[in-house]
Image (cartoon, rainbow, N blue to C red):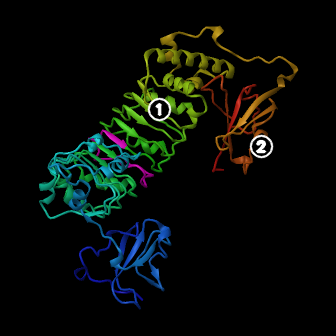
Amino acid sequence: MPHKMIASDEKPLHLKKGKRIECNGERGTVLYVGEVPPTSGVWLGIEWDDPSRGKHDGLHEGDRYFQTRHPTSGSFVRPLKVDFGRSFLSALKDRYREIKGDDTYGVDPTKLSQLKRELNVRFIEIVGLDQVNKIQSCLKDLQVAGLRDEKISKGDQKGLISEECPAIQELDLSRNLLSDWITVAEIVAELPCLRVLNLSENLIQVPDDPESISHCFKSLEHMVLGKMEYSWDDVMTCIKMWPNIQELQIPSNNISKLATPPLLHALQSLDLQANPIGDWEEVNKLGILPGLETLNVSEIGVKVIRFPEGHKTSLFPSLKRLIVQENKIEEWVSISELNKLTALQSLRILQNPVVDMFDTRTSRQLVIARIGSLTNLNGVEIQAMERKWSERDYIKQAATIKLRMKIPDKDFIKIHPRYAELVEKHGEPEEGELVLSHTTSLSSTLIDLVICSPQRPGVKISKKLPKTMTVQRLKVLVNKILNFNDPRCLGLKLTNPKHPGMEINLDNDQKSLDYFSADTGDVVVVQQSTER
């Protein structure tokens, strides 16, 4: 039997569906306000941020009061037990208090170290944080305000904020109790100098009419929206509120699919870190942004980087800085693809399998040689002499691999697209610089291989195997050695520490090791796939 909710004109202002609350240190969202028979009085139906905090999904004693996303994230709480938050100025004055004996305001010394930690969390980079530990002459001169985790849920009487603190340029409102963009707009509208706003970890509902409040955000240039549970469509709706946005950070959201953005042509910097995107083709949809100079796509799960066919790409015409750290990039061809970017100068690519398979120095040389425009790699400047010797060593390695594998020219260029350009620049390597292995004894039909897998860290097995062994038989052997579930789900790749950049996919189960030019000293890298 459905139960009647209290009419809106019968409720106190704070008792409304969608409001954010805190109770005993736990955060949640109000989804129901009304009676829960047979008890009397008002109850709040809460969806808790932590699903283990609740007891049900809004179905109680056979009646549906509300619906949560998780089966155990809902429960009922009396209003008197709930903290509905406080106003912006209440929090501001509490954190930036008057120092006794001096007519100045400043950061409470007992909170300063905490404040600096809060504002410097990994996925948030706000300009000018060093100003926080400078004593401000008064609230009217305060330019950087850190109000993280202050239970702010509302603004103040119109005109009070602009009177008390009109000079704020950078504002951190992360992890508060803000629930709607109207409230945010009311606060921001009274901060005419605001350039940077951080609203991370507030579960704010996407607005129905974003254009109607866009005038409130006209001074805003940099927005941070981490851990908001937003999709790309949600972000594209919100972007209509920020007509002059230049830098957008939206890490750790629910963004898996991207689309060509129609309203981001002024954007210079975009942070998509730790979103479950997975496919580089989605990233390429952002390539039409004419002014985008910095792109952070670390921790998004990509394995392969590809751009359209051609020597250079028209995508990302202004991109100077690219961050692809902590992904799953496995092949050097993906690194060579980045050479197609016409403006790329700085790259961060640490913690990817492709660079982790070699020592830091070798991996650095290979990346430098494959991307001609780089001036900075992983935060370290590339000197002219370093580039010269990286490229010369790369030519020797590539030429050795070409001779050993007998690769046709057209296939070799696909793997090493800069080779001809570098040979023209530095000249062909001398014959004596190419090191090829020769086996002439009766045992030459056997080769020593090392078997390893990134999914079995620390395990390296040496095996003497016949060149005539097929890939299919090798998979069965590897499956037994490394204890994988199914040899059919294994992918094998041949590499060699002495020839960095050599990658041969053992992609035909019926072919022999000799067919793939396997030789003593090669390493078989094993990867278990979830697909069959």
Q: Main secondary structure of the magenta part?
A: loop
199, above or below 338, in the image: below
142 sits to left or right of 432: left
Residue type marked 1: Glu
Q: Is residue 440 magenta?
A: no
192 sits to left or right of 323: left
Q: Residue, x 86% and y 23% (percent of image)?
A: 443
Which stretch did the figure color magenta? 249-270
- Residue with the mark numbered 2: 481
- Residue with the mark numbered 1: 309
In this rendering, does residue 210 appear at all? no
Judge by depth and name the residue closer to the eye, 211 or 322: 322
Q: Name the spot of residue 193 as percent of width and height, x first.
A: 17, 47
Q: Residues within 10 Å of mark 1 (few under 14, many from 20)?
A: few
Distance, label 2 to label 1, CA atoms, is 40 Å
205, above or below 131, in the image: below
Q: Name the spot of residue 34 as percent of width and height, x first.
A: 34, 83
In this rendering, does residue 261 appear at all? yes
